[in-house]
Structure formats: structure tokens, C-alpha cells
Image (cartoon, rainbow, N blue to C red):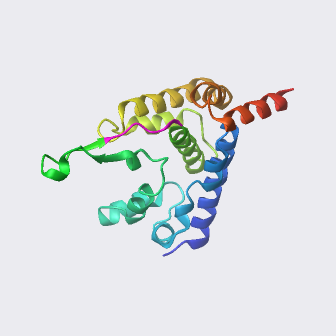
Amino acid sequence: MFHFVKHFMTVNEHRREVRRGCFRVGLYWQGLTHDLSKYSPSEFLQGAKYYQGYRSPNNAEREKKGYSEAWMHHKGRNRHHYEYWTDYKPGAEEGKGHDIIPERMPKRYLVEMYVDRVAASAIYNKGHFTYDMPLKYFQRGDYTTLMEEHTRKELENLLKMLAANGPDVTESYIRNVILKHYPGAKIAERLTNRRKK
């Protein structure tokens, strides 16, 4: 059974949460364009078909078919997923092996990945979300082979900071340390300080 309306509402809610998070750290364009591919037929139809409301429909599709077509489409079009930043080892095309290697994510996509994970955790745990949930979800996964080491450590540090200190401290750190050279982060910092007065 297809759940077109429920899936559409979930995608919209997720995008709204990510947009708010991205705006708070100064990633305005990424906040506006986040996950637009979820409205494409390749992703939306599968999402509506496997919709459950408490987790990603990609997981249900994967369990049913052994893989997720929607996810394969999504990860190749959205730079905030670490899987986007994987490639063959140089020389593989000449028959010297087919090892897939991860590349370090640019800071703005790393931050969008952090915001994405927090938003998804909040939506799928509606009513009982706590700031340590994104970290616990991260720690259940195995990121040793496809997520570049620095990217993995930076993401884990942000999730630990969120769990220990909450979003205000973590977002201030993102604006003033990770994205300190991004004009949008400076604007977001000024707006945050103005709201506090």
C-alpha cells in the first residue's frame, strides 16, 4: 500500500528541520536545497511504498529486496552523505584492484550531514527525542571502511558535543570553528547574538 501523503509530509517535515538547522549555522543555500531529490519519482515512489513513519523507508525497501533503489539514487545526488565521497583507488581502472576509498568531506557537507542526522533522529523519535540519540545511532553503525577517518572523527565529535552540551553550544562551535571562514556562518553568528540580547 502506498502512503503518498504521509511520506510527503515526512519529507517536508524533515526538510524543514534541516533547513532550520542549516540556517542556524549559516548554510543557507544548503538548507534550501537539502534532499530535493526525495521528490523525484525514483525516490518518492519507493518512499511512499515502504513508508512506516518511525524509520527510513529505505530500510524497509532494503529488507524486502536486498537493496534500496531509492537510496542508491539519493546518495549519488546529495553531497551531505559520506557515501557520495567514495571512489575507486587510483589505478583500479587499469586492473590494479577495485578497492573503494573514502575521501574527506568538505566542511560544509560534513556540517549538513550532522544537521541531517539530528533532524532525522528528532523526526523518527518524535515525542521522546533526546540529544544523545543521534550519537547512539551513529555508534551502532560501522563507518570504518567507507567514511574517511577525519570526517568520521569530526562527525562523532559534533554528536558527542550535542549529547553533552546541547544544540546551542554545538552550533556555536560549528559557526566559530568549523565554518569560521564561511560568510554565512558569520551572518548566522551575528543573528544569534542579536537574538540573545
Magenta-colored segment: predominant secondary structure: loop
Residue at image coords 56%, 25%: 161
Name the residue nearer the viewer: 106 or 63.
Answer: 106
Query: Is residue 185 a member of the stretch shown in magenta?
Result: no
Going by the picture, which residue comes out furthest to the left? 95
Residue at image coords 55%, 71%: 3
Q: Is residue 191 left or right of residue 183?
A: right
Point out residue 181 in the picture as x, y percentages from the top left corner.
62, 30
Q: Is residue 33 left or right of residue 136?
A: right
What stretch of residues is rendered in magenta? 102-107
Q: Quadrant of residue 39?
A: bottom right
Name the residue nearer the viewer: 104 or 17.
Answer: 104
Name the residue nearer the viewer: 180 or 156.
Answer: 180
The C terminus lies in quadrant: top right
Q: How many marks?
A: 0
Point out residue 88 in the picture as x, y percentages from the top left corner.
26, 48
Going by the picture, which residue comes out furthest to the right? 197
Name the residue nearer the viewer: 184 or 84.
Answer: 184
Going by the picture, which residue comes out furthest to the bottom? 1
Query: Is residue 103 a member of the stretch shown in magenta?
Result: yes
Point out residue 23 in the picture as x, y percentages from the top left corner.
69, 43
Point out residue 17 in the picture as x, y percentages from the top left corner.
65, 49
